[in-house]
Amino acid sequence: MKKRTLLVAVSGCLGLSMAWSQAKFPDRPITLVVPSAPGGTTDFTARLIAEPLSRALGQPVVVDNKAGASGNIGNQAVAKAKADGYTLLLAYSGYQVGNPHLFKKAGWDPIKDFAPVAMLTRAPQVLAARANLPANNLRELIAYAKANPDKLNYASSGNGSIQHIAGELFKQMTGTEIQHIPYKGAGPAVQDLLGAQVDLFFTTPASVVSHIKADKLKGLAVTSNARLTSLPQVPTARESDLKDFTLDSWFALYAPAGTPAEVVQVLSNEVGKILATAEVKKKAEEAGTQVDYMGPAALADYTRKELAFWGRVIQSAKISAD
């Protein structure tokens, strides 16, 4: 009887301890690290959830853009941060599952260094062009590029980014020669595209949808199976005879490895509620992205699968960032 009483007492204390830790978190501001410059879809996704998450948790959620080294600077910062839930990573798939195959020493490991919290959104790529480019659709672009080898260039958010991979795959599939110009994030690339300093940019819709709607940029194609509701006038690559040219980016929330499971679950639960709201879904769709919530276990499994998939893609495209 005494043993049973002791076990009950210990169990009760453990339960109270867990309840206390959940109630205790958070008791100060949370930093949400974005491994790219302001203005891109990663930054948009961070700001999509930051304010409502702050309201839900009762503490400020501060977006901190740490651009550079194709996302490695931001990822390293979170990987090395204290595992207490107060420093989080807004991960972009091109970095999270692409960089480990592109860099010999990225400085972080997508499996060992991070605790999955929640999948947030996903988006196809849009091929955007400067407004005065002498091509109005994908077929005209391919014809122009073949007639003018090496005259055109395309921007990316960094060597080895999904935009870089998209550009190289496009060149392989169309037999064209287009020069690659890497930037430190989507924001700076879009600014130079608007200024006609570069010709083309493969990017997620949020970076360019408003500019395409305002006729400041041309939307030549989207890499999804169906047209986007936010850009209904832009045809799919499939419609332009590039049937296998489909690419999908995703954006997810991670904490440093070793973050207490109850803290991860608190964050994941609140994010899930936020993504389920009509307001957030609408904002995501208007920017050309789609809400796609996953919890910690599902995201962990998905990360491993995507890591293997992009390893095969990058190897077949013979891309290296080193």
Image: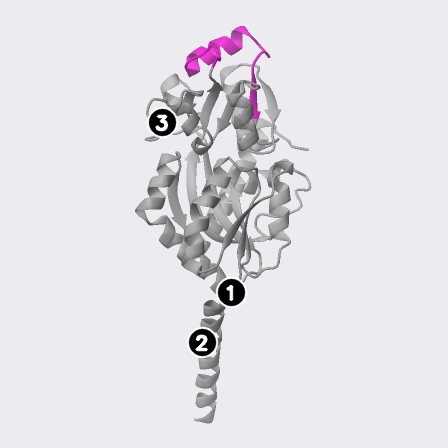
- In the image, residue 117 lies at what x, y percent? 48, 54
How far apart are the alpha carbons under marks 2 and 3? 51 Å
- Look at the numbered discs 2 and 3 and tell me whether their residues touch, using CB distance below 8 Å: no
Q: Residue furthest bottom?
A: 1
The C terminus lies in quadrant: top right
Q: Secondary structure at mark 1?
A: loop
Neighbor class of circle 1 (other Cα within 10 Å; few <14, some 14-19, many 20+) is few
216 in relation to 17, above or below: above
Q: Secondary structure at mark 3?
A: loop
Neighbor class of circle 2 (other Cα within 10 Å; few <14, some 14-19, many 20+) is few
Neighbor class of circle 3 (other Cα within 10 Å; few <14, some 14-19, many 20+) is many
Q: Amino acid at mark 3?
A: Leu
Q: Nearer the viewer, residue 238 or 206?
A: 206
Q: Which residue is mark 3?
A: 231
On whether residue 138 falls in the magenta region, the answer is yes
Report which quarter residue 177 is drawn in: top right
On whether residue 301 falls in the magenta region, the answer is no
Q: Which residue is mark 2?
A: 15
Report which quarter residue 229 is drawn in: top left
How far apart are the alpha carbons under marks 1 and 3? 42 Å
Mark sitting earlier along the chain (1/3): 1
The N terminus lies in quadrant: bottom left
Judged by depth in the image, the label closer to the viewer, 1 or 3, is 1
Report which quarter residue 16 is drawn in: bottom left
Tell me where the magenta segment starts and ends, as one range: 132-155
**Which color scheme does this rendered protein use?**
one colour
Please give the label number shown on residue 27: 1
* Residue at left offset 46%, top offset 49%: 50
Residue 222 lies left or right of residue 33; in this view the side is left
